[in-house]
């Protein structure tokens, strides 16, 4: 299972890619947590947006989706 972790604006993004029934197509799962926190939130990407031809494509899309979520949500009430 390919996995990638990156940091973005004080959050850790962890994405994993899973092959769908040996079809050569992949879906992604996504976890976003505040860096250094033991509390975790899991976000499942919509399946309709999430079938990819490679694990790398699935991971790239999941990471981009997570960055958009973090950028759009007012986590600290500062905006």
Image (cartoon, grey):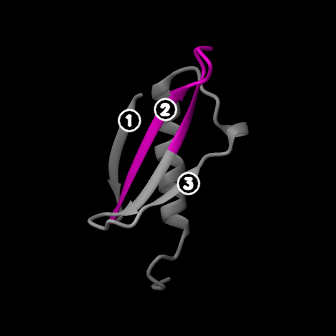
**In terms of image quadrants, where is residue 27?**
top right
C-alpha distance separating marks 1 and 2: 7 Å
**In terms of image quadrants, where is residue 15?**
top left
- What is the magenta range? 10-29
Q: Which mark is residue 63?
A: none
The residue labelled by disc 1 is: 3
Asked if the magenta segment contains residue 15, the reply would be yes
* 3 and 2 marks in contact (CB < 8 Å): no
In the picture as drawn, the residue positioned furthest to the left comes out as 36
The residue labelled by disc 2 is: 17
Q: Which of pointers 3 and 2 lies earlier in the amino acid sequence?
A: 2
* Quadrant in which the N terminus appears: top left
Tell me: 46 left or right of 39: right
C-alpha distance separating marks 3 and 2: 14 Å
Query: Magenta part mainly helix, strand or loop?
Result: strand
Q: Residue at x 44, y 57 (%)?
A: 32
Asked if the magenta segment contains residue 66, the reply would be no
Q: Which mark is residue 43?
A: 3
């Amino acid at each position: 299972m390919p996995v990638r972790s990156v940091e973005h604006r004080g959050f850790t993004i962890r994405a994993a890619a899973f092959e769908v029934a040996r079809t050569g197509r992949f879906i992604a799962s996504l976890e976003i947590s505040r860096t250094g926190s033991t509390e975790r939130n899991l976000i499942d990407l919509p399946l309709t947006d999430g079938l990819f031809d490679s694990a790398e494509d699935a991971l790239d899309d999941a990471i981009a989706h997570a960055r958009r979520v973090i950028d759009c949500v007012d986590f600290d009430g500062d905006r």
